[in-house]
Image (spheres, helix red, strand yellow):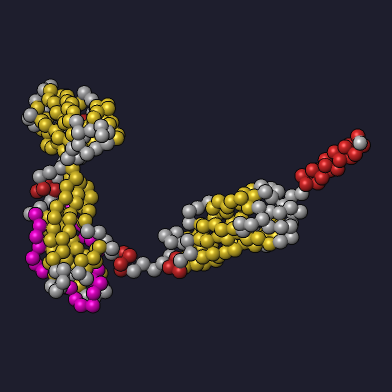
Amino acid sequence: MKFRILLSLVLLLALSNLFAQQKSKFNFEEETFDFGNIKEENGPVTHKFVFTNKGDAPLIIQGVRASCGCTTPAWSKEPVPPGEKGFVTAKYNPKNRPGSFRKSLTITSNADPAAKTIYIKGMVETKPRTAADLYRFKIGDLRLRYQSLNMGKITTEKPLTRSFDIYNDGEAQITFLDKIQKPDHITVSFQPNVLDPKTKGKLVVTYNGKGKNDFGFVSDAVRIYTDEEKDAEKSLRVIATIEEYFPPMTQEELAQAPKLKFEKITHDFGSIKESASVETEFIFTNNGKSELNIRRVKPNCGCTVSKLDKYTFQPGETGKISVVFNSVGRRGNQQKSIVIFSNDPSAPTQRLTIKAKVQDVS
């Protein structure tokens, strides 16, 4: 009896060792596949990597992880018996990915080794860009890159001129009319004034920063008109960031200039209830030797209101900017800014920041 039990234990141990020694093993026909040159406009491409289980136990793929969201994997879901074939598929999407690529797919399985990596590579030929790709904003047959014409940074020294590409996407000429609705500090013209079908031209904008009489980010509505039967009126916006111009100054001149100095530039209200209005003050001093002029105080949000009692300060004089933050309709962490424009040549633009954590009271 004891002998039979001992024999059974020996056989069980032998079988356990045998099963423990059984392994599954990948043998891919190829571990790297080169798609060569592919065209972006033709969409995704797919390749199937075929493998044979060269081990002596069923091979189970537990997952495949691609190195990029542009690559979608698929694989054999059922166990692959010894000597049988399985697959891993790689689907690559070349959209907006011009140039060469090399992506990996890492396979996790019960094989030896447990992780296996295969690769795809190739070269994406960029999709030819159409007029609609280049000029995405369209009114009538006229196309522009954007509805807003961005002039960038402008100073009050002198007017700035910039040109913007336009394109006639129609089958007939477009004539630009003299009728243009715009503010006085902006001038608009066209080159050429008559734009042939399927051709490119220029919309030329001249912006007088001093004439705008404002600072920081500004936006102006402009309407242009053409001879088209449909959508002859075209509404655009001209945007810019205006800064005051200061001529080059010597160290002696800078020493005599006004100097705007704040006691603090950040205030944290901490936790406040939704719909609450909270107020703080930012104290400043003219530390310079000339009269300080505050040009503009501009909050970046309608939820923030600033108040300044006066705008001119003598050397050594102190002032304050009151800031009220209204949290109606706002929840969570809030951060708003108030931009100060002055005639301090060393720091003509300064930014104050307020913070709050608005709690939901519902």
Most common secondary structure along the magenta stretch: strand
Instruction: Judge by depth and name the residue closer to the eye, 174 or 202.
Output: 174
- From the viewer's perspective, tell me whether residue 86 is left or right of residue 125: right
Please say whether residue 339 is visible from this viewpoint.
Answer: no
Instruction: Judge by depth and name the residue closer to the eye, 349 or 218.
Output: 218
How far across and how far down the image is residue 310, in percent? 7, 30
Residue 168 among those drawn in magenta: yes
- From the viewer's perspective, tell me whether residue 60 is left or right of residue 230: right
Please say whether residue 119 is visible from this viewpoint.
Answer: yes
Which range is magenta? 159-183
Instruction: Judge by depth and name the residue closer to the eye, 226 or 105.
Output: 105
How far across and how far down the image is residue 252, in percent? 18, 29
On screen, residue 318 above or below 147: above
Instruction: Name the residue located 28 percent from the left edge and 64 percent from the top edge.
Output: 135
On screen, residue 168 above or below 285: below
Instruction: Name the residue located 16 percent from the left edge and 64 percent from the top edge.
Output: 234
On screen, residue 217 above or below 146: above
Quadrant of the rendering where the C terminus is positioned: top left
Q: Residue furthest front?
A: 1
> In which quarter of the view is residue 205 placed?
bottom left
Instruction: Name the residue located 59 percent from the left edge and 63 percent from the top edge.
Output: 48
Quadrant of the rendering where the N terminus is positioned: top right
On screen, residue 153 above or below 31: above
Instruction: Name the residue located 9 percent from the left edge and 25 percent from the top edge.
Output: 314
Residue 236 among those drawn in magenta: no
How far across and how far down the image is residue 174, in percent? 17, 73
- From the viewer's perspective, tell me whether residue 295 is left or right of residue 31: left
Q: Residue furthest bottom?
A: 171
> In which quarter of the view is residue 146 placed?
bottom left
